[in-house]
Amino acid sequence: MTRERDPEQRPTAMPPAIPGGRVSAAAQWPALAGFVAAEARLQEAALARGRVTAGLYEFVRFGLKQGWACLFGGLLLALMLGTRLVWPAHAPVARYDALFLAALMLQVAMLRLRMETWSEARVILVFHVIGTAMEIHKTAIGSWVYPEANLFRLGGVPLFTGFMYAAVGSYLARVWRLFDFRFTRHPSLRLLAVLSVAIYVNFLIDHRGIDLRVGLIVVAVAAFAPATVYFKVWREHRTMPLLLGLMLVALFIWFAENLGTLSGTWLYPNQRHHWSIVPVAKLSSWFLLMIVSYTLVARVNGIATWPAVPAAPARRDLPMARAIHLGLAAAVIALGLLLRLPHWGVPLAVHHYGGGILWGAMLFLLVSALRPMGWGLHACLIAACAAAALIEGSRLVHTPALDTFRTTLPGQLLLGSIFSAWNLLAYAVGIGAAAALAVSLHRERRRAALPA
């Protein structure tokens, strides 16, 4: 993350206004608004104690804001875990029904206390409906089950499950408002709408052997990689690649899903007799689901652009950069082929992980050589890391067609067969080294272009 100074920065005792004329939930809810003045004094004290204390305060503030944005989802997860531990086996109300009624009351309370706006609630309702529809379909084909009986259900799906999907929409709507999101190079909402429809349709048909997940992820990465999100934790806006932010949210949803299955609220087929961690491959599903939820929230909130960033100049040296990176990629491929020659007699670990480092470097250089116009090196870095993680994660997926392809030489070179976290580390080292080299070459070209 990097820091950008807000051009309209000014100290205030009240929470900042939200783009579009709305005011933060803290100002609307008296129980929170009473803490605003005390929090302002705490800010002044942190500033008076120096940069380290101010940085620590901002870090804590970031965590508290994130926790506040996760309020609905966090409470729902706590209810799942708590009822699993204490709910009586012969209670007059089934556990799933109690979760449904509790989630319903939570949603009503958040609206009554103005912690959510009605426009946000409408988006969450849409996500609730499409999430429930997908649950009905997925449980019907046996993707996962809800093992307990209850009254409020549609088919094999308890009605509280829609609130789990709504929790994702609730988090995005609240975090957007709490951090005053602004963007540069944001993808078109029309493109995101088409992509979201394709993602949802793919979720419904992938059990028929028609799984377009890899292609959809590639499109999503290409759309979001150039985008930067500006978010305000305290006094200044900070920046992060938007794609990285979406990936991190998907990762935390995967953590929450592991806790949900640990509570026995729903189970995958491999968890019915003994709990085990949710497959890492599920991260791809949550990432794609994030795109659907993000699109719905973005259409309501609109895309506020960051005014302090001037338009990027045309990259006249891009063709030369492409040629240099393509040539470096060819050199790395040649080194990788030399490493595979048997007469070198290098240790197996050097052969394997050295090849992984070269493969990661090659991946970054190819992405930077073939990148779309408007992509900077940081976008190429994210895209290369995402592609490496996706390819390594594909080793956890086994189908007859994939396994047959893996036995061929192209399949061995492109996909491999055994998943290993150490491979991901080797790829990261190679990508990082190639990115550092690309930055160094870019700076040298810039210096050479300057007048003497």
Image (cartoon, helix red, strand yellow):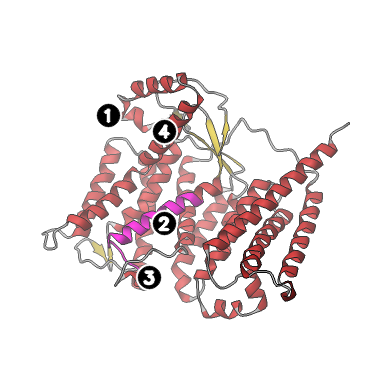
Q: Earlier in the sequence, mark 4 or mark 2?
A: 4
Amino acid identity at mark 1? Ala
Amino acid identity at mark 3? Ser
Rendered residue at 49%/66% (across/down): 202
What is the distance, in whole Å, between disc 3 and disc 1 at their CAs?
A: 43 Å
Residue 213 seen in the figure = no
Mark 2 or mark 3, which is nearer to you?
Answer: 2
Q: Which residue is mark 4?
A: 61
What is the distance, in whole Å, between disc 4 and disc 1 at their CAs?
A: 18 Å
Numbered disc 3: secondary structure: loop
Residue range of the region highlighted in magenta in the rendering: 247-268
Q: Which residue is mark 1?
A: 31
Q: Up-down: is 371 above or below 32?
A: below
For the C terminus, give its image quadrant.
top right
Q: Up-down: is 113 above or below 335?
A: above
Rendered residue at 25%/68% (across/down): 147
